[in-house]
Image (spheres, grey):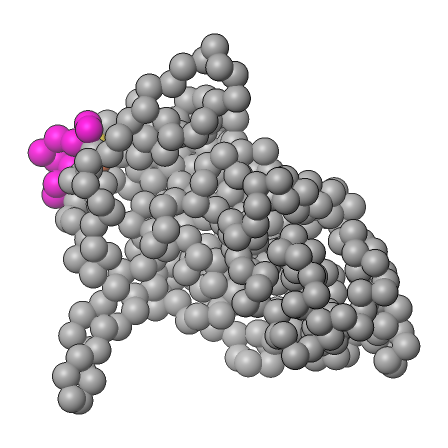
Amino acid sequence: MDPTPLLRVRNLVKRFPIRSGVLSRVTDHVHAVDGVSLDIQAGETLGLVGESGCGKSTTGRCILRLIEPSAGEIWFEGRNVTHLDKRAHRALTRDMQIIFQDPFASLDPRMQVGRIIGEAMVIHRLARNARERQDRVVQLLETVGLHPDHLHRFPHEFSGGQRQRIGIARALAVNPKLIVCDEPVSALDVSIQAQVINLLEDLQQQLGLTYLFIAHDLSVVEHISTRVAVMYLGRIVEVAPSRALYTTPRHPYTEALLSAVPIPDPTVQRKRIVLKGDVPNPIQPPPGCHFHPRCPRAETRCRTETPVLRDMADGHQVACHFPN
Ligand code: SF4
């Protein structure tokens, strides 16, 4: 049996109400997250991948309770933290932090870098005085590859990659155990992406961090992830150790995503699978398997019966009636 995971999520659901009319009545819901369950062991990186709008960022934000889940449970270090009161939740935010996708939007342009990084240390009373706080901020700047002189500069004076390093330093300021990395490199140039991913890997080694690493591109999470979970329209459709997922995908959607990932070796050919149609409307997701209108292997049963995530072998789980 698995040891108690650092994070356990069970049947997480998030529905966003749609309001209309003069009285702003709720007329429908966007089914953003539709029964997600996952475990993350301490020290591992779980990659969470899917097309934009599939619910992966909403999942990350529900875990941190930046938005309230509609249903489901979240456990951290064996403790149910789904319904903590404000004070207990604030204490928990020390253990769980986030790095946002857009380093341009996530840093207050009016604040100097030292204050941005040190703010959470003030909230959690992690320094005895301003001097101690500043020393710690300088140490954090160096840890993420920035210069101590950057302390008094403003975000607009930095490049995109440097701003993301500031975001990482801000997350590290409270010594978290888990960091939700919400598309942390998607807004960066390809050449900078590798540097930021290498930094996150080094920090994980040094500090024993655990990551939920969200990305829309399978190639981004391949090297950093211990395991990868693939999401489609609010549900996890496949989870596997990273290598197994890339070499022997078992869900047709994962196969299609992988077929679009370029292979660096020109002698290796991979047949591109082009999916028909677009991702369906999450206000009215298709019945049965959400993927059936686009699936090349769909059969009658897929239109009515929802496939559950089943254990195959060696940690590989697939939600499909006809897996590979
Ligand atoms: Fe395709 Fe059916 Fe599997 Fe869904 S359950 S992925 S429609 S084969």
Give the residue at the far top of this rendering.
267
The region drawn magenta spans 296-305
Q: Is residue 73 left or right of residue 304?
A: right
Q: Main secondary structure of the magenta part?
A: loop
Q: Position of residue 312 (x, y in %)?
A: 38, 28
| The C terminus - image quarter | top left
Q: Is residue 300 magenta?
A: yes
Residue located at (88% from left, 68% from top):
135
Residue 13 painted magenta: no
Q: Nearer the viewer, residue 306 or 187?
A: 187
**Which residue does the image show at 53% across and 34% down from the upper left?**
222
In the orientation shown, which residue stands out farthest toward the front?
157
Q: Quadrant of residue 97?
A: bottom right
Taking the spot 16% from the left edge, 74% from the top edge, the residue there is 27
Question: As rendered, which of 271 and 241 lies closer to the eye?
Answer: 271
Give the residue at x 38% y 30%: 260
Tell me: residue 226, above or below residue 24.
above
**Viewed as shown, does residue 251 lie left or right of 290?**
right
Dividing the picture into quadrants, the one containing residue 321 is top left
Viewer-proximal residue, 85 or 286?
286
Q: Mark yes or no: residue 116 visible.
A: yes
Q: Position of residue 141 (x, y in %)?
A: 80, 60
Q: Is residue 267 above or below residue 297?
A: above
